[in-house]
Amino acid sequence: GGNGGNNEPAKSAFEQAKEAGKFTVAFVVNGTLGDKSFFDSGNAGIERINAELGDQAYGETIELTYDTSTWGTGLEEVFKTGWDAIIVGTYDMKEYTIPLTEQYPDQKVWFYDEVWNFDDAEGWQYCPSENLYAMMFSQNEGSFVVGAMAAMLSQTGKVAFMGGMDNTVLDDFYVGFAQGAKYVNPNADVNLSWMNSFSDATAGKDTAQGLYAAGYDVVFACGGQAGLGGFDQVITEAEGNWVIGVDGDQGAYFASLGTDEGNAKAARCITSMIKSLDVGVFEACKRHLEGTLPYGTNDALGIAGDYVRAAITDTTTTVFTEEQLATVNQIIEDIKNGTIVVETAFNHEDGWFTNYVKQNDSTK
Amino acid sequence: MKILLALLEVFKNPAFYGSVLAVTPPLLFAALGCSVAQKADMTNMGMEGIMLISSFCGTLAAGYIGGPNPWLGLLVGVIVGALLGYLVAFFNLKMKVDIILVGIAMNLLGGGATAFFLPLVTPNHDRTSTNSIQSGILPLIKLPFLEKFPTLNAILNNQNVLTWISYIMIFVMAFLLYKTKLGLRIRAVGENSNAAESVGISSSKVKTIALVLSGILGGLGGTFMSAAYLSYFSNGITAGRGFIGLAACSMGEANPIPTALTSILFGFFYALSNYARTTGISDNIMKMWPYIATLIGVVIYSINKTNKEKKRRAQLSEK
Amino acid sequence: MENYLVMQDITRVYDNGCIANDKVNFSAKKGEIHAICGENGAGKTTLMKMLFGIEQPDEGKIIIKGQEVKLTSPTKAIEAGIGMVHQHFMLVPSLTVAENVILGIEPTKGMKFDMDKAVAMTEEVCKKYGFDIDPRARVEDITVGLKQKVEIVKALVKGCDILILDEPTAVLTPQETAELFVQLKLLRESGKTIIFISHKLHEVKELCDQVTVIRKGHTVANFSTEGVTEADISRAMIGVDIELQVAKTPAQPKENVMVVKDLVVNNYVGKKVVKNVSFSLRAGEIVGLAGVEGNGQREMIDAMTGLGVYAGGSITMLGEEVKTKNIKGLRKLGLVHVPEDRMTLGIARKMSIKENMVADKMDNPRYAGKIFMNKKTIQEDTDSFIKEYRVLCKNGEQPIFGLSGGNIQKVVVAREFTSYNRLVVVDQPTRGIDVGAAEFIRERLVQMRDEGKAVFLISADLGELMNLSDSLMVMHGGEISAYFPDITNLTEDELGFYMLGVKKMSDEEIRGALHE
Amino acid sequence: MNKTNKKGLFANMSVQNKHSLLRMAVAIAIGLALATVLIFMTAELPGVALKYFFTAPLQDWSYFSFWIQKAVPIIFTGTAVCIMFSANQFNLGLEGAFLLGGFFGGALVNIYVAPGNPALGIPLGCLVGGVVGALITFIPAILERLFNASVMVTSLMMNYICLWLSTFLLFSVFKDPKTSKSTYSWASANKEIMVTKFNLDNGKLTIFYSLIIALIVVVIAWFFLYRSKTGFKLRQVGENKNFAKYVGLSVGSLAIIAQLIGGFIAGLGGACEIMSLYTNYRWVELTGFGWDGVTMAVFAKNNPRNVPLAALFIAYLRAGAYVMSIKCGIQVDMTKIVEAVIILFLLAEKFLSKTYRKMIIAEAEKERAERAAAAAKLEG
Ligand SMILES: Nc1ncnc2c1ncn2[C@@H]1O[C@H](COP(=O)(O)OP(=O)(O)OP(=O)(O)O)[C@@H](O)[C@H]1O
Ligand SMILES: Nc1ncnc2c1ncn2[C@@H]1O[C@H](COP(=O)(O)OP(=O)(O)OP(=O)(O)O)[C@@H](O)[C@H]1O
Ligand SMILES: [Mg+2]
Ligand SMILES: [Mg+2]
């Protein structure tokens, strides 16, 4: 609604925050909110900044929409507006970010989901910025845990990973997931399927349908809004078919809706691989304000700091036995203390991932 | 070889055929909707937009009025569809805008208005889908007696009520077009509006009714997407199904049964593209198939028609 | 007996200013078949459209059974007991006979359209009046004769007392016509009033009781058919007023430019409408073609000009078979054509006068190079054409649809006459245009003849034909029914007899048109 | 007749033209009024939002650049549609042509054929893009010619075939595994972004060369349609097919030529769009520019000359809406609603028809009065 009656030219919240001398943070989404997943999680981090650090900082989420042709201009616009720190991420945004870090040397960039080349001047996309902090979530570690849980529950020995679009971060999910499944059941068949979308829920539903029909009884739906389609599918499947959420605690989300359908979805969601961008965002802000944020480095945010973890919901405790849950906890401990070394999709030569998939996915 | 075997595996799986039945209805509704309009010589290019808007409005009604009430959503979706059909008729017949361009404008409006209003009307200001509104899902039809026959059970049991309605609709539309007074008038007006006018039938009235019917079917198709396929509205949820309906209608020459068969063929390929991803075939290739099939179908159909026409001429000239 | 139907002082002016009916009076009794005769464009159809509520009279009144009626729509007319069989079929091809028949008054049974009832209704009418039609046959599958009967049944089933038949026999074979007449007579016996429009006078004589003749929107005669001959009717119809005499010297025909030999043309439904026609067109001569519309002229001209195809015989232009050439090729040979239907064939409505003038000249290096048009020459030449042909317009850039009908025709004529030509086919060149412009066009035709071009003139204006033609052919029933190598002694009455099929020449005489 | 009364711009305009201008103005006004209402309904600070929406592209160079950037692709597709619609060919395959033109011409040429060599890559990319685009529209065209298959339906299907073909090729062959949906970058080859642009005012104003290409295409298209003899023939076919046949044109071939040219321009546009905005190919959805082309052609009355203006108008709305969306969080999709409404009213022949009659009658009265005055003068 408008602000009728106020004749003064109103100031936006950003301008008010600036005037109050607060540290302003923009979370730039190269898509739109509402994915109940990664972007929403980051948005939750912003809300937490406003709630807990509100006296010193102010945050806002800015959506660039899925129209790729606007991303460059949109990001530049955010820099130009004068936000003190800009949170942005994914490979697609990297090329736009590099020149802007030079052009706007007074602003900070907190970049997620991409490894940066800070030192090799001859190397690919060299960016010696002192203002850039790169946070890399170890999704492979969290995925290992949910992979193990999937294999424990699977009756058919066939579990599936349903990704949004093929990229190294998503590959990293699969690598951990497959390794975790094989850790529990060395004969497990771990299917890799792509929805080719992060936004189209029908694509997720359709993909999941094919997977369940082919006997994959636990599906890791890993692709934002599109992945939610997997939840729509699983509730039409027979008992004994399960789904795993991603990024946020999607089971808890559906349970919180309090409807029959939400409950049905929650009841089929054995866990979610939480990738806490919210924690990352919030911690970055907190550490920046404390002056301890390590700019110019690639910061690995792993299972150790609870940056990634497997969600435990009512469903989890119902469908898994005490014993199984104990094993899960043991696995988590082993990853933390290095007994289990989780493979990653990063830092390999070309073709490595294709081979890796072939070893784990019987259809490839 | 491995791929062929895997495909065979898919074809042996009765759930696949159940899936064909489950993915076809929106295409079917769209195609039948286009066909009733086409019979009155109105090409309803705006089907996609009509489906989107009615899906959106239906979802809102289902979620906001009386808690999750998908039946109400269906009703509202259908009413909105009918209104939009009327709008198309109004702009074409009264304002004299080319019907194709009205359709294109309708599609623009459909994509734009739903995406624009979505965050305004959802409690969490959702940008992509109405996840925060609980609009519910139309009931599944459970047929316990089928459980004794596993194959039939996998195909027919637990289909959505709207799925059944969509197949019933084939016969309803066939009945309407071929067995009722209105259908007769629609066909007469579509084929020779002068002839209809000369016996006192108002062709613009009949065309308007046909487009309203078309809108109603579009409304059903749209609501299917958000109250049966998914349980919420999501931006661009129809994903080109309105256009496919138009193509199916064109291939079936707007006759309900052939149009429906074409839609089912389309659904078959669509389901196949879902199932084939576990066979190692690229699903992008699979996704191309329905369109290629339609393309080939349209060509074969056109060749046939040309030949028939030639034969008819030849026969006449012999007399 | 009291007049059952009276149309009094009916006047109808069309939007374009054409006075189609000017105080026409017409009346018919119960149980008679009443013919309306008149030349093409006399206003017969217009009168009938007003009776059937399609058009509204600007003046005059319609009285049925002594009561004045306002027929504002076909529905009203049907209610008043009027049925009409239109000059062109008003049928839906893919529907069955019964469905066509009951369209507009569909019987229903619950929600369903009652097909059985429809069939029964159709059968009942058919039985009552002796029509033999299968009500379940699809209209697209039945013969033209049957279609015509379906049209009549369509009118009858609605319970009409007055049945209008607008040229019902134009498309029928003699056998079909005979059959139809039997049924019409039956209808008359059952007390229906039938209004019958036809150009075939022997039919009128055979079938009708009364005949009203209309000429140029006026009622000119009303006879009982008992007392008159076909020749009398013909004379009443054809009144030639030769407005102006274009002066011309006797023709000096030279070589054949186009030779048509044993030409056979089928129309779009496959009916043979041009039957073994032979003639030739010679340089330096204007050959006229007379005939009532619908006697095969349309199809023959289409075949000659490359717009249509022909099924048998040959057409050669300067030794080349027309069939083997496309229109572009024919135009290269020097064939130009002023079409009858100037609005849909002769112009591109939204384009400028200039563009319409040069539309066919793009392969002439004067007007276009390899890629670009020659803007300046086009501008200059069209300006001079506009001046020469006295096209009334602001300038050449004006879109052509803003011109009056006559000026549009001048543009078409100018385009065709200024292109390379050896043979000029002009179809109704002066229809609907003013006297001055018509005279201008006629003078040009004579001038072209004198320049040694072959001119083929088709016109419904007999005065024009008799004034301009050096020799004249008459077409009737798809054949040449007369050939006059010299028309100085020809009278319009005589011409009317041949056009209306009252008379026919011997084959020998007709063969003369070939100039072998 | 030459009674030129110098009463300003509209004095010498025909009533039809005046009315059609009036109708356009009213249609646009309705659209913009609707936009204003929508903004008031949704914005927290409607004044601020309105300011961005209506003036953003004029506020500074980068918004200005963004405005121009948004106009370029729709200039291409609009021109393409103008040519096809001028010949009355309803080929809707431009979505596919644009997409594949970008994929083959814009991306693959620069990655594999002319890496690091913009001097070759750009012209070759344009050419390949155009040819690919022409191929896409050619298929429905030839199917109609040979088999009489509805070009509208087959071209719609072509769009989806193009989409899935390109995603298949992208994901299974050409994708850079590091990325989610992009090909390898051609920037890698010469270490800097290859997109060619003018940079003025310290890089604040960025105008891509593709704008120049687009404008050249517009000029050529206009010359082609209104000055060349083939273009003239195309327009005759579009205006009246029977007439075209009667004056001796080969209608079928001309119809195909129109579609080939349309496809070529769209494909060229796709290549230019990819080469200027991106350093890799990443479209996995139809771009919508093909449909925009139809809107443009409607606005431009099928005359390429008017396309840049129409495109600038729509792009202005879109750029304004986008800035407004970033600043005030209002959905960009609003412009689509506005566009749809404008199209409907712009095309509605019966819209304001009463005003038209009034204008006509007033004009006639005026003329009559003038004539009477002149006659009186003569007598007097
Ligand atoms: N809709 C119309 N608008 C303008 N003029 C018309 C219209 N219909 C007919 N006319 C003109 O009115 C005149 C009378 O036409 P009408 O159709 O009544 O002739 P007709 O006697 O039936 O001729 P025919 O024997 O050729 O059928 C003709 O000059 C014709 O050109
Ligand atoms: N569709 C039209 N749009 C605009 N102006 C028109 C249109 N048709 C005719 N006019 C104008 O109206 C006037 C009268 O046209 P109309 O065709 O009635 O003339 P006419 O009296 O029949 O002349 P002619 O004898 O040359 O056919 C002309 O000045 C013409 O320019
Ligand atoms: Mg007539
Ligand atoms: Mg006139």
Image (cartoon, coloured by chain):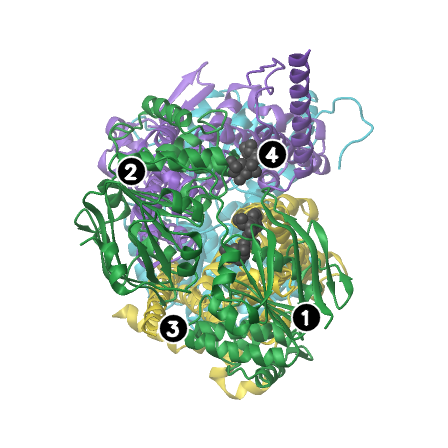
Residue A151 screen position, x and y as percent: 45, 66
Instruction: Report if the beta carbon of the residue with label 3 is closer than 8 angstroms to ligand 1.
Output: no
Report the amino acid beneath label 2. Answer: Arg
Local crowd size for mark 2, using a 10 Å CA cut-off: few (<14), some (14–19), many (≥20): many
Q: Which residue is mark 1?
A: C29
Do dots 1 and 4 share one subunit?
Answer: no
Q: Which residue is mark 2?
A: C449
Q: Chain of mark 2?
A: C
B199 with respect to C268 (left or right) = right
Label 1 to label 3, Cα distance in Å?
79 Å
Q: Chain letter for yellow? A: B
Disc 4 is placed on an element classified as helix
Q: Chain letter for green? A: C
Marks 4, 2: nearer the viewer: 2
Chain D shade = purple
Quadrant in which the C terminus of chain D appears: top right
Residue shown at the point (56%, 73%) measured from the top left: C152
